[in-house]
Image (cartoon, helix red, strand yellow):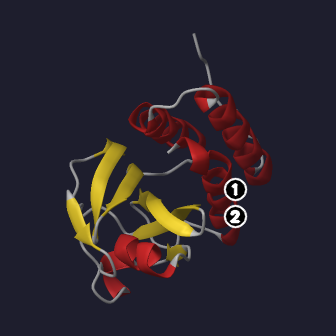
Amino acid sequence: MFDFAPDATTPPAERYRQLADAADALTQGEKDSVANMANLAALMWEYVPDLNWAGFYRVVGEELVLGPFIGRPACIRIPIGQGVCGTAAETGETQRVEDVHAFPGHIACDAASQSELVVPILQSGSVIAVIDLDAPTKARFSVEDAEGIETLANRIADRI
């Protein structure tokens, strides 16, 4: 049985280190990307406070297709280059959006989402998926959050 439960008083940098270590332990040796993404979505839900959505979109051709997640039902397909997720997939760069309603072309899958953090996952220099985190408050995600999820993305890229 796995019991990955962070202490609520753990500082963010340590919390993200623990998240990356838990992700590594949970996915090591598992080759099924769907199973790994499902467990990783659950881990992010446990380790990253104040979320209303945590999960993945996978690159399939010229669009992103919904992957495992935790939260309300979501958009199934997003064209590359559209919305926050599509922009991250197109540019290969992390998108940290303080107010999603001010983001040009934002795709509102859940009206409760106010801020968003999207981190691309790369293999051999190409984006294969994105990690998408949504929060019900504006300006929820800090640079430290972005760096922590980028570390996670780098650590698990070969398991997606």
Residue at the spot x=57%, y=66% of the render?
141
Label 2 crowd bin: few (<14), some (14–19), many (20+), radius 10 Å = some
Task: Tell me: residue 77, above or below residue 49.
Answer: below
Task: Tell me: residue 17, above or below residue 143.
Answer: above
Residue 7: x and y, percent?
70, 33
Residue 135: x and y, percent?
43, 60
| Left or right placement of residue 23 versus residue 98 in this view | right
Res. 140 in view: no
Which element type, helix, strand or loop, lies under badge 2? helix
Q: Amino acid at mark 2?
A: Glu
Q: Amino acid at mark 1?
A: Thr
Closest to the observer, 10 or 69: 69
Residue at the spot x=27%, y=57% of the render?
65
What is the spatial separation of the Cα atoms under label 1 and label 2, in whole angstroms?
A: 6 Å
Residue 9: x and y, percent?
74, 40
CB of mark 1 within 8 Å of CB of mark 2?
Answer: yes
Residue at the spot x=55%, y=41% of the render?
159
Residue 28's tag is none
Quadrant hosting residue 80: bottom left
Closest to the observer, 126 or 100: 126
Closest to the observer, 45 or 94: 94
Residue corresponding to mark 2:
147
Quadrant hosting residue 25: top right
Residue 151's tag is 1
Quadrant hosting residue 147: bottom right
